[in-house]
Image (spheres, rainbow, N blue to C red):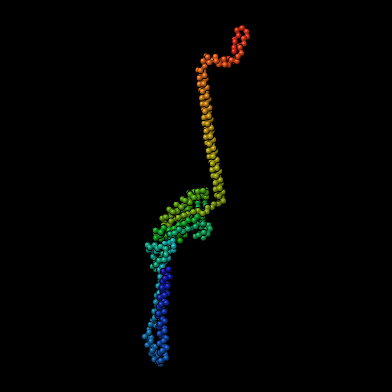
Amino acid sequence: MPIFVLLVFVGAALLWLLLSFGFIPIGKLSNRLLKDASDAMSKDEKDEKIEDKEEKYPMRKNGFVGAIVLAIIIFGGVILGFSCTSRVPTGYVGVVYNMNGGVDGEVLSQGWHLVAPTKKVTTYSIGLEQSYLTSEEKGDSPNDESFSIPTSDGKTVRVNLEFSYRFDEARVAETFTTFKGKSGEQIKDTFIKPKIIAWTQEVSANYPVTDIFGDKRTEINAELDTYLRDKFDKYGIIIDTVNFTDISVDDETAAAIQKKVTAQQELELANIEAQTAKVQAEKDRQVAEINAEKQIIDANAKAEVTRIEAEAEAQANREIAASLTPNLIEKIKYERWNGELPTVSGSGAIVSIDGVD
């Protein structure tokens, strides 16, 4: 239960007890005494008794005044207690400072805390806060907060950007002093967002419009992320993420970019086709070499077979020649004679036996 609520309940309870035990008994006693005196005594005696009663029970008048004073004291205490409490939201820390602006040195965690009336608390988020610089209403960007960035080739690009950040918990007292007591929300609006724009423009000036608008956006985004982290670190501000969510250019620039992209694509296609042709030619060359080698191998194999066959035949002829004796030759001639006598014609004719060599 919050402290100020507890104080209210305690004050109310004390006031109720005071009124109950201070007024009710006095009222009943006074009424009874006045009634008895009026019945049994004369007017003089009644006046005398009343005076005696006022002297004997002065607490009726004094008790009422005391109750009022005590109630005022209690109520004032409750109000004072309420003014001495401060709540730090979840995900935040609080820096305690004196009314003259000096940092007290105490950093409060989330929850309810008692703080002296002469001191105040400024809170800073240590959990991630998402922020936007967009042309549409989104998050903390209720108006058109998109911005223009320059390029290295003299063009201008309109961008939407979102980022997340938090304050370094260990340095919030330093941050308080640096920004002269501004709250985290004020620092975001007056420092973080303007610097995000300015430092993004510094990074974009190193790239041509085709890179920013084209396929190098991821590379540029990574460089911007690193650049912003380094820039904000010395202020105790941690940049977690930063991303371009939309990039737009005028029609003329868009047409030029498209023309360049088309030319680049055609060049890449030509390179791919040339590379493919080169690969095919290399493949054909390798196939030709393989076929040539195969033909050589086949020719060598045939020549080797012919040589072996010739050597075998020659060897066989040599063996046959070595085995032919005169008797064997005559035997062969006889076996090959067909039984016909030689024919003689004219003088000096040579007689031959057909069929015998």
Q: Residue furthest bottom?
A: 42
Q: Residue furthest top?
A: 347
Residue 68, given in percent of the width and then of the height, sits at 41, 78
Quarter of the picture holding the N terminus: bottom left
Vertical arrangement, residue 54 with respect to residue 150, above or below: below
Q: Nearer the viewer, residue 41 or 79?
A: 41
The residue at the point 53 percent across, 57 percent down is 135
Residue 313, given in percent of the width and then of the height, sits at 52, 22
Q: How many marks?
A: 0
Visible residue check, residue 304: yes
Visible residue check, residue 83: no
Residue 115, given in percent of the width and then of the height, sits at 39, 67
Vertical arrangement, residue 354 with respect to residue 84, above or below: above
Q: Nearer the viewer, residue 239 or 320?
A: 320
The residue at the point 41 percent across, 55 percent down is 234
Residue 191, given in percent of the width and then of the height, sits at 45, 58
Q: Residue furthest right?
A: 345
Vertical arrangement, residue 119 with respect to residue 265, above or below: below
Quarter of the picture holding the C terminus: top right
- Would residue 30 appear left or right of 341 to someone viewing this image? left
Vertical arrangement, residue 131 with respect to residue 66, above or below: above
The residue at the point 57 percent across, 15 percent down is 334
